[in-house]
Every structure is written in C-alpha cells, then in structure tokens.
Image: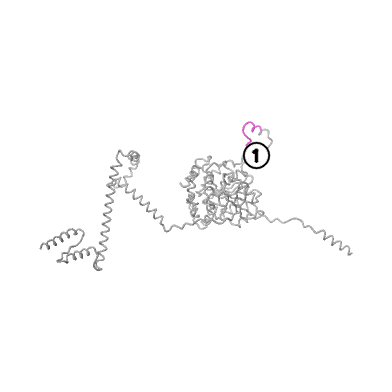
C-alpha cells in the first residue's frame, strides 16, 4: 500500500515539473505508467506517431528555435549593458586617462553636434540611439563591401601580355637605344615629316590613333613615333630632363634620314616634349601641332583664376597624384605597382584618376578603344620598371628649365649694363629675333576635363601668336582617336590641300653610246666602198 502511494506521489511531482514545458502526463496503472509517460512526451515533441503528427513536429521545432534566439538576444543585450557599466565605472571616471585626454575635445564636438538630437524620437536616449546608428552604419558598409566582392556581374580581369620585340631601334651617342616606328610614305617621297612623342602610359604604337594609311599617302606625310626612355623598347635614361628629350628627338630625325625641317606632334602630356623641342631645337622644326596640350599645373606665371579653373576639373585622386609627384615622388611607385604595373588590365579613367564627360566616357567603353588601349598599355609597361613612369610624372610638375613665354618671338637681348648698351649703339648688325618663328596650332576640346580649356587659355595668353582651334562639344579622346574626318581637318590645316607623295625622280643621266663599235662599223663600211 505504501508502494502504491509513493508511486502516485512520484507521478504527481513529475507532472508538476514538466507541466510548464507542455508535456502531458498520463496516469497509468501498474507497470504501464512509465510507457504512458514516454508516449505522451513523444507525442508532445512530435517524435513518434504517424503522419498526422508531422505538422506538430515542425511547429514545435520552430517554436523552440525562435525561443532560443530570443533568449540569446536578451542575454547579449544584458551582456552589452554589463560591459557598458564596467567601462563607465573603470574608464569613464573623471580620474581616468581617457577622460583627461579626450574628454574636452569630445565635449566640444558633442556640443556642436547636439542639434542632430532634434531628429531623434523624444523618448530615446541620444547616447544609446547614436551608438545603435553608428554600429548599424558600420554593419551596412561591411555588407555592401561583401556584396561587391561577390558580385557575379563583375567582368573577368584580363592579364597583360608582353608581345615579342618588333621595333626598329637606333643607337644614340650616349650608348642608349631608341625604339621607333614609321608610317606613311617613304623618306624619298615624303612632302612632310612629323615626329610624335607619346603621352603618359603610352608608347610608339599610339601615334595618331586610327589614322588611315590612305590619308598619309594623300598628303604625302611620313609619321615617325618613338618610345620615350624606359618605355616600350627604348633604353632608360639615367638622368633625363626636357633638354635630353629634345636631343633624343634631334638624333632620331638625323638617324631616319629627315634632312629638312620636320613637324612635331604632341597630344596630352606628350605635349611636354613638344614644348621642349620648340625650346631647344627650334631651328629643326617647321611647326607644331598640339592636341589638348598639357602644361605644368604649378606654372608660376598662371593667374589665380587660371589655376583654379584647372584644378577644379580634376578628381581628388588625381590632385593627390600631382601633390605626391611634386612633394613625395617615391610614394608614386606604390600606386603604380598596384594599378597599371600589376600585370592586369584596367580602365584608363580609374588607373589615371580621370574625370570624363559623357562623350568621353561613352567613347572609352567602346570595343575599338578598349582593344587599342590594352595593346598600347602592354607595350608601354613592357620593361616592368616603375622608374620611367615616376620620372615622367615628376617632369610634368617640376621646374621645366624654361617658360612658355620664352617661345614667344622677341628681340634678342644683347646683354645688360654699359657693354650691352655700347654694342647696341655701334654694332651695324640688325636686331635678331629669338623664340620659335614657325606656326603653332592647338586643338582644344571645350568639354575636356583631363586637360581643361583653362590650360589652353593660359598658353594663348603667354603666346599671342599661337593658333587655337576650339572644339565646342569635344572631350579629351573624341576628336583625336579614331575620327577620320577629324584627322583630315588637322592635316588640311597644317599642310593645305593634299598633293600626294613627291614624284619618283627619273634618272636624267644621258646614255653614252659605244664609240668603239660605231667606229668599227664606219670603217668597215668605208672599206667595202
């Protein structure tokens, strides 16, 4: 009897314990009581039974899963509050180092930003609310970065392919080799010769992009392009400047048989070397054609307005590159190795931090430009040496050694002081002119944000004789690249109506008759008579 009472009391206590969890207790007599309890528990948890218990099973697991995470969230909140209290009690007291060091500045910043609390609900603690906003913002940025990294629409990155060497090269007096390429008519039939240095991150393959061979034949033009020192297949120069650049062009002209004066073509930053040729070898030049010519953005003779209009068109990244080139040039190597010297292809606007207009941006996204650009870059970075690129960037923003105003036609100075005055009084020679005496043509796109029109306005101001052709709706690339009509306009402006190549010179040497044979025949005829 006592055993029966103990068994009954045990069942009642067990039922009271498990009642809160939703277990149903089924009293059973005899030895079947334990089996009844197990069956009831299995039914409640959805473990046993037939197909009618499938819905109960899924709902039960979902319920316990949700309740578990609710509890975990509540525990996390309480843990965070505990950590906050510990920080306040130990680090945020008036005697702590952090409060002494940063308390004053943080209080000033908080006072200035207190007006933002007006945008919060009235029943919210500002400290708690802004903390939540800050962490939500951080998590959102992290999620955006993860999504961007795993974006399936990102195009495949193409690796840079180094082509076999195929350039013609000349040996310069200092032992270096200079690589070049010729287009157009041969030397003996050329009416005009033109030499073109390339721009930054380019090579001899650029020239005039898309210029047709038929157009060169029509004007009788011989176009010679070459790799700057350290670019393409040209050997680097140990200590180059703008004077050595002009001398390289001079030696190239003689080596390829250009005996008459030649034209120089400069595009974008390649115009720097064209300016140097106008300064150091003006007697060898017939004229200059400049398209979106670059000048030193730190030029001292620029007005404040010209300098402001130039810098405002550039992206912050490009401004930083100019500052680094002028002040901390060694840091440029880090950025160059991570971009165009990384062995992978990329977009020109991102690599060079260019801000482009709508027409320029649409143009560089086309397949024709992309194919040309990638091939030109592969040739430019052939040697994998970062030094020539750093040198080119530094040359642009450093002291050129001359001013553009020096190219202006002016009377040659005879010297200062009494000696110069006496020479001018008693010398019978006429006053000599200095500067460049030939024509200078500039084509400038008014929507160009790479070389802003303010740079051309500056050139026009310091060189009044320059002829500027302003292109109303053109950008930096749209007029010079792959535009047959544009190329025809440029060549017609420089050379007039096309006359074709020079005619082949016929040999005017008179034919000498064989006098011995003539005499023999005459004598023979005479003897027969």
Q: Is residue 415 part of the magenta span, yes or no?
A: yes
Determine the residue located farthest toward the bottom in the rendered image: 50
Task: Magenta stretch: give its range.
Answer: 412-422
Which residue lies at the image location 41% right of the left edge and 57% below the top edge?
Answer: 151
Total marks placed: 1
Q: Which of the two residues, 120 or 376, is positioned nearer the viewer here?
A: 376
Which residue lies at the image location 68% right of the left edge and 33% below the top edge?
Answer: 426
Q: Is residue 128 part of the magenta span, yes or no?
A: no
Q: Position of residue 37 (x, y in %)?
A: 19, 64
Q: Position of residue 413 (x, y in %)?
A: 62, 36
Q: Secondary structure at mark 1?
A: loop
| 264 relative to 9 in the view: left or right | right
Quarter holding the N terminus is bottom left
Which residue lies at the image location 78% right of the left edge and 57% below the top edge?
Answer: 512
| 59 relative to 2 in the view: left or right | right
Q: Which of the two residues, 265 or 343, is positioned nearer the viewer here?
A: 343
Instruction: Say how the picture is coloured.
Output: one colour
Residue 367 to residue 324: above or below:
below
Q: Which of the two residues, 63 or 86, is positioned nearer the viewer here?
A: 86
Determine the residue located farthest toward the top in the rendered image: 418
Q: Position of residue 403 (x, y in %)?
A: 57, 41
What crowding class fits label 1: few (fewer than 14 Cα within 10 Å), some (14-19), or many (20 or more)?
A: few
Q: Position of residue 170 (x, y in %)?
A: 62, 51
| 424 relative to 311 in the view: left or right | right
The part of the image, by quadrant, that contains residue 376 is: bottom right
Quarter holding the C terminus is bottom right
To which residue does mark 1 refer? 432
């Amino acid at each position: 009897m006592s055993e029966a009472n103990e068994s009954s009391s045990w069942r009642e206590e067990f039922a009271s314990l498990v009642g809160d969890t939703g277990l149903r207790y089924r009293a059973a007599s005899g030895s079947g009581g334990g089996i009844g309890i197990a069956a009831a528990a299995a039914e409640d948890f959805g473990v046993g039974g037939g197909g009618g218990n499938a819905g109960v099973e899924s709902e039960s697991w979902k319920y316990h899963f949700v309740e578990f995470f609710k509890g975990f969230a509540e525990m996390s909140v309480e843990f965070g509050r505990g950590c906050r209290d510990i920080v306040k009690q130990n680090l945020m007291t008036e005697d702590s180092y952090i409060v002494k060091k940063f308390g004053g500045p943080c209080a000033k910043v908080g006072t200035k930003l207190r007006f933002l609390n007006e945008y919060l609900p009235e029943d919210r603690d500002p400290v708690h609310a802004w903390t939540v906003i800050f962490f939500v913002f951080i998590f959102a940025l992290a999620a955006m970065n993860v999504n961007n990294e795993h974006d399936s629409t990102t195009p495949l990155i193409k690796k840079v392919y180094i082509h076999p060497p195929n350039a013609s090269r000349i040996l310069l007096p200092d032992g270096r080799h200079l690589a070049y390429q010729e287009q157009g008519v041969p030397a003996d039939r050329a009416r005009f010769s033109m030499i073109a240095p390339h721009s930054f991150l380019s090579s001899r393959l650029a020239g005039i992009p898309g210029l047709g061979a038929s157009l060169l034949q029509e004007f009788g033009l011989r176009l010679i392009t070459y790799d700057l020192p350290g670019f393409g297949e040209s050997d680097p120069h140990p200590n180059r400047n703008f004077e050595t650049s002009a001398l390289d062009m001079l030696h190239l002209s003689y080596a390829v048989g250009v005996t008459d004066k030649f034209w120089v073509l400069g595009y974008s930053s390649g115009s720097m070397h064209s300016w140097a040729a106008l300064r150091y070898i003006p007697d060898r030049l017939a004229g200059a054609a400049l398209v979106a010519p670059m000048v030193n953005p730190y030029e001292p003779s620029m007005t404040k307005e010209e300098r402001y209009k130039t810098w405002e068109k550039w992206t912050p990244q490009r401004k930083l590159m100019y500052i680094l080139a002028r002040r901390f040039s060694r840091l440029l190597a880090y950025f160059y190795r991570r971009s165009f010297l990384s062995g992978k292809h990329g977009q020109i606007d991102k690599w060079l931090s260019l801000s482009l207009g709508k027409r320029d941006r649409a143009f560089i996204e086309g397949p024709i430009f992309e194919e040309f650009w990638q091939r030109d870059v592969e040739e430019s970075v052939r040697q994998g040496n970062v030094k020539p690129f750093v040198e080119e960037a530094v040359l642009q923003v450093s002291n050129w050694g001359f001013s553009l105003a020096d190219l202006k036609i002016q009377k040659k100075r005879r010297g200062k002081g009494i000696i110069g005055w006496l020479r001018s009084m008693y010398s019978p020679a006429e006053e000599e002119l200095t500067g460049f005496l030939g024509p200078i043509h500039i084509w400038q796109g008014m929507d160009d944000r790479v070389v802003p029109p303010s740079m051309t306005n500056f050139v026009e101001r310091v060189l009044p004789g320059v002829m500027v052709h302003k292109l109303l709706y053109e950008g930096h690339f749209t007029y010079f690249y792959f535009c047959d009509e544009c190329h025809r306009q440029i060549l017609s402006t420089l050379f007039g109506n096309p006359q074709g190549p020079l005619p082949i010179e016929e040999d005017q040497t008179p034919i000498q008759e064989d006098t011995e044979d003539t005499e023999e025949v005459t004598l023979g005829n005479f003897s027969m008579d």
